[in-house]
Image (cartoon, rainbow, N blue to C red):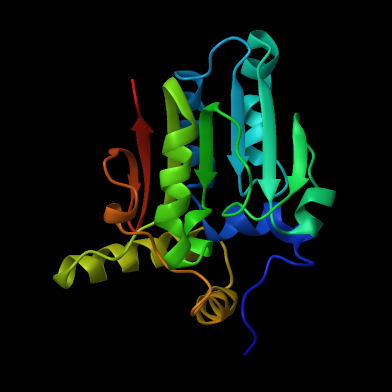
Amino acid sequence: MSDWTFKGFHDEFDRHVREQLPWYELATDAAVLIAKHYIPKGGLIYDIGCSTGNMGRNLNGVLLERKARLIALDECADMIRAYQAPGEAITADATAYDYQPFDVAILFLTLMFLPVAERQELMARLREKLRPGGAIIVFDKCVSAAGYEGTVLSRLTWHHKLQSGAPPAEVTEKEMRLIGVQRPVSTAEIAPAVEAFRFADFAGWIISNS
């Protein structure tokens, strides 16, 4: 069975992610509302791992109102070609990109697809470039809780995927194809941070310097 990849998947991505992650819209709304608290007039925002532009589309109003600039990054050229949202979309490796000082960086379901060895260095670089009063917003799959509670949370995630109408065979196949490709995030990799969202194995955090 081949590894999971985003290449050549851009046409199906928006449907697929909402089917596989039934809380996707709720998490999107949460991330956008959090971001609005930290975007100043004329600010700079990075959408790191932008896919087809979900964050950019939902931030459009505040970007226009505050005349803020959005730079969207994704290493998958297919996603950048399919990008339909405000801002400048760039094909780039998030771990090697030369970030400018910024006000908000959003990593929405991104860190879990980056090599573990490179995550802490990336987070350190982002903290260094974060302007006073700004924030780094991370939404991702977490390392499972210990003990029976970990089993409960994992089953809760699977339950809602199946309830959303995702075919069981497709859910199972994707899970197996993610082996070694998707590595859940530990809180130690992003600490110190404030948890702002939680659904079973997935969570969202705010990292600020305000």
Q: Hey, which residue is sitting farthest right in the picture?
A: 81
Of the 4 image quadrants, the one containing the C terminus is top left
Is residue 122 shown left or right of residue 2?
Answer: left
In the image shown, does 103 or 203 lie closer to the viewer? 103
Q: Is residue 195 above or below residue 51?
A: above
Counting the numbered discs, the total is: 0
Q: Tell me residue 98's x, y (percent).
A: 63, 43
Q: Which residue is pictured at 68% across the width and 23% down the height? A: 69
Quadrant hosting residue 86: top right
Q: Tell me residue 122's x, y (percent).
A: 48, 50
Q: Which residue is pictured at 26% across the width and 41% down the height? A: 192
In the image shown, does 121 or 203 lie closer to the viewer? 121
Answer yes or no: is residue 154 visible: yes
Q: Hey, which residue is sitting farthest left in the picture?
A: 147
Answer yes or no: is residue 85 visible: no
Q: Tell me residue 29's x, y (percent).
A: 51, 32
Is residue 144 shown left or right of residue 128?
Answer: left
Q: In this view, does 69 lie above or below 30?
A: above
In the image shown, does 94 or 80 lie closer to the viewer? 94
Of the 4 image quadrants, the one containing the N terminus is bottom right
Q: Is residue 76 above or below residue 61?
A: below
Q: Which residue is pictured at 61% across the width and 24% down the height? A: 44
Q: Which residue is pictured at 37% across the width and 59% down the height? A: 185
Q: In this view, does 94 lie above or below 178?
A: above
Q: Tell me residue 105's x, y (percent).
A: 52, 35
